[in-house]
Image (cartoon, grey):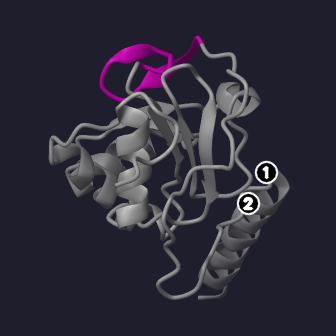
Amino acid sequence: MRRVVWAVAAGAALLLAFVFRSGLQPAYRGPSGARPLVADSAPSTPLPFGIVLGSLNAGLVRLEPPPGGLVIHYWATWNPESGPELAALDSLARTGAPGPRVVAVTSDPMPSVARYVRRRHLTLEILLDPGGALEGTAPRRAVPSTYLFDGLGRRVARHDGPVDWWAPETRATLRGVATGGTRPPTS
């Protein structure tokens, strides 16, 4: 019994050391902490893309912002907020509504990512970045963390923590980028 307790304690200590050393701390926002994704006051200058990442389903993928924009969503298998976020993104992508290309990026090992995605029946585009190649273009300060780029590669929005993907503000921001703008359309 003591061996089991010591093994569990050692495993928990190793996990905590990894999380705090890597700087990837969950961005908690309270019990229902999801907030809408809203555009920054002004888009940034175009960022360098052309980064090649591993894809869970397609081998290697060159990451470029398409004309309709690009959402980069960082997530992790160990983060409890990632499950609901990925489910919402997957559901949003399945609606067929026009919007930016959505990629979910993780640095977790491929076997655990594949198992996580399979168990949740996700069809979302999952990219693997174990070496942090994307950090120069879209640094992550927390998990989950989300970036929105327009079709020119300019950062339009950044959000640390869970996003309310169904909020009218979020939908308006995504629609604005998808239609070639950087601001939500005004009515």
- Residue 22 numbered tag: 1
Q: Is residue 101 visible?
A: no
| Residue drawn 32% across the image and 18% down it | 58
Q: 10 Å neighbourhood of mark 1: few (<14), some, or many (≥20)?
A: few
Instruction: From the image, tell me which residue sits under label 2.
Output: 19
- Helix, strand or loop at label 2? It is helix
Q: Nearer the viewer, residue 23 or 100?
A: 100
Give x and y (percent) for residue 34: 49, 73
Toward which corner of the image does residue 7 lie, by quadrant? bottom right
Q: Is residue 121 visible?
A: yes
Q: 10 Å neighbourhood of mark 2: few (<14), some, or many (≥20)?
A: some
51 w.r.t. 74: above or below: above
In this image, 96 relative to 10: left or right?
A: left
- Helix, strand or loop at label 1? It is helix
In this image, 154 relative to 34: left or right?
A: right
In this image, 60 relative to 166: left or right?
A: right
Amino acid type for the residue under numbered disc 1: Ser
Kindly indicate whether the residue at mark 1 contacts the one at mark 2 (C-beta within 8 angstroms): yes
In this image, 67 relative to 140: left or right?
A: left
Q: CA distance from mark 2 to mark 1?
A: 5 Å
- Residue 175 numbered tag: none
Amino acid type for the residue under numbered disc 2: Val
Q: Nearer the viewer, residue 111 or 120?
A: 120
Give x and y (percent) for residue 159: 61, 56
Whether residue 22 is in magenta: the answer is: no
Toward which corner of the image does residue 144 lie, by quadrant? bottom right
Give x and y (percent) for residue 129: 58, 31
104 w.r.t. 101: above or below: below
| Residue drawn 22% across the image and 54% down it | 91
Q: Which residues are magenta?
A: 50-66
Q: Quadrant of the N terminus?
A: bottom right
Taking the view exactly as shown, the residue that stands out farthest to the front is 187
